Image: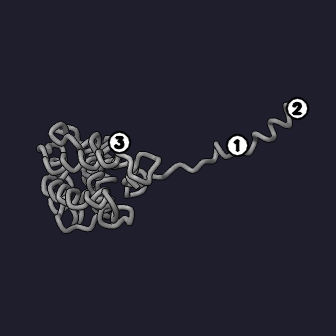
Amino acid sequence: MKRPAALLLLAPLLLAACTTRQPGPDVSGWGDPFTLGAQDALEDFGHTAGMEGRLDKSLFAALRVEQLAEAAQTDPLWQTGRISTLQPQLLMARRQMRQAAGIAEAAPPRPVQAGLYRALRAAQAGDMAQAQAALSGPAFPLGGAATLQRLQHLPRLPLVDQAAARTALIAGSPGPSSNSGLPF
């Protein structure tokens, strides 16, 4: 085959590689909460005692706990098999994280996730005024400054740590019908 003909055959592949849609930031995080969040649960929120003074880490941990707890309640994948056994533990972890951070216990998950996500992005950019502003409204009754202060100094949260360990364990062990290493 001549070189120009070969290049013509490769053109669609090269074009596809250049135009592959990247996942945009959405309030639920970075993709499917189970496949991305559960696999990295230990790293993301499994060692709360080590988050002291690490605001970005604790904001991300709170966001990930919120995402996984919501998935456990609403995602059909979480309603069957071993995954369904995580729901009570993740809901208790969310309750403990919310109490520690000063987030309203009865707040709907989406506004909490949206606020935590915006605060995380702002904190990573060094814009603490914007991070505080992101944590306002009924879901954050203490206000942005107090919520950030509490997240900056999270105590050890044993229910959160245990939920992270169990979630990572289940996510990392293959289920009976899986060839991906995931339990579904």
Amino acid found under the numbered disc labelled 1 = Leu
Please name which of the two marks, 1 or 3, marks the residue nearer to the observer. 1
The kind of secondary structure element at disc 1 is: helix
Q: Nearer the viewer, residue 9 or 111?
A: 9
Q: Residue at x 47, y 47 (%)?
A: 179
Q: Name the residue under label 3.
A: 125
Residue 140: where, in percent of width, then height? 20, 61
Residue 121, above or below 184: above
Query: Which image quadrant: the N terminus?
Result: top right
Q: Residues within 10 Å of mark 1 (few under 14, many from 20)?
A: few
Q: How is the image coloured?
A: one colour
Q: Mark 1 points at which residue?
A: 13
Q: Mark 2 points at which residue?
A: 2
The kind of secondary structure element at disc 3 is: loop
Instruction: Report how far apart the C-alphas of labels 2 and 1 lie in the structure.
Output: 18 Å
Q: In this view, does 135 lie to the left or right of 171?
A: left
Report the residue that reaches farthest toward the right.
2
Residue 53: where, in percent of width, then height? 18, 37
Residue 145 in view (yes/no)? yes
Instruction: Report how far apart the C-alphas of labels 1 and 3 lie in the structure.
Output: 36 Å
Amino acid found under the numbered disc labelled 3 = Ala
Q: Is residue 30 left or right of residue 162?
A: right
Q: Nearer the viewer, residue 148 or 32?
A: 32
Q: Which of marks 2 and 1 is nearer the N terminus?
A: 2
